[in-house]
Image (cartoon, grey):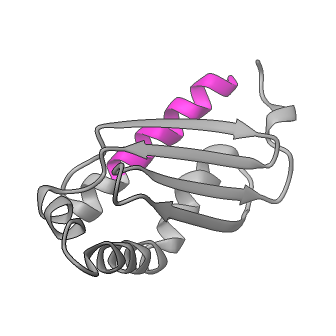
Amino acid sequence: MTKGQLEADISRRMVQFAKEQLGRGPESVRTRVLEDVVLVRLAGVLTRGEKHLASQPDGARLIKEMRLRLIESSRRALEELVAEPTDLKVVSLHTDLSTRTGEEIVVFVLDRNLEAALEP
């Protein structure tokens, strides 16, 4: 598998995960493999209701807390989402969400350098 094919596969898996967990996927997604890190950038992730809530006092904090709890409760599924196509173990997972731009970043740290093993 080429690097581009793997990145596209992980992007597709992330969209499917979002649809299953939130009922809708992001407007766009980009995945990049950088040595032992898989970086996924999802744009347009906020629902209409979340956008409205984000404009309210304390709304952004509530949205971030809810999304973080969702990630934590689905951590095993997210790790498998990357572990399966890469054949590597996910060592750690990090995420952040901008309630201003509606973008979410998910970072997977792997146990080995994946980029070196892939075709260009």
Q: Nearer the viewer, residue 101 or 48?
A: 101
Q: Tell me the residue at 33%/48% (across/down).
A: 16
Magenta-span inclusion, residue 13: yes
Q: Which residues are magenta?
A: 1-16
Question: Residue 78 placed where, x, y %?
Answer: 50, 62
Q: Nearer the viewer, residue 85 or 112?
A: 112
Question: Residue 29 placed where, x, y %?
Answer: 42, 37
For residue 99, side relative to residue 87 (left or right): left
Question: Residue 2 placed where, x, y %?
Answer: 68, 22
Q: Tell me the residue at 76%/39% (across/down).
A: 34
For residue 101, side relative to residue 37 (left or right): left
Q: Nearer the viewer, residue 64 or 77?
A: 64
Q: Main secondary structure of the magenta part?
A: helix
Q: Nearer the viewer, residue 29 or 85?
A: 29
State the count of labels.
Answer: 0
Quick one: which residue is furthest to the top in this view?
Answer: 120
Viewport quadrant of the C terminus: top right
Viewport quadrant of the N terminus: top right
**In this rendering, is residue 114 above or below 57?**
above
For residue 23, side relative to residue 81 (left or right): left
Q: Tell me the residue at 37%/75% (across/down).
A: 70
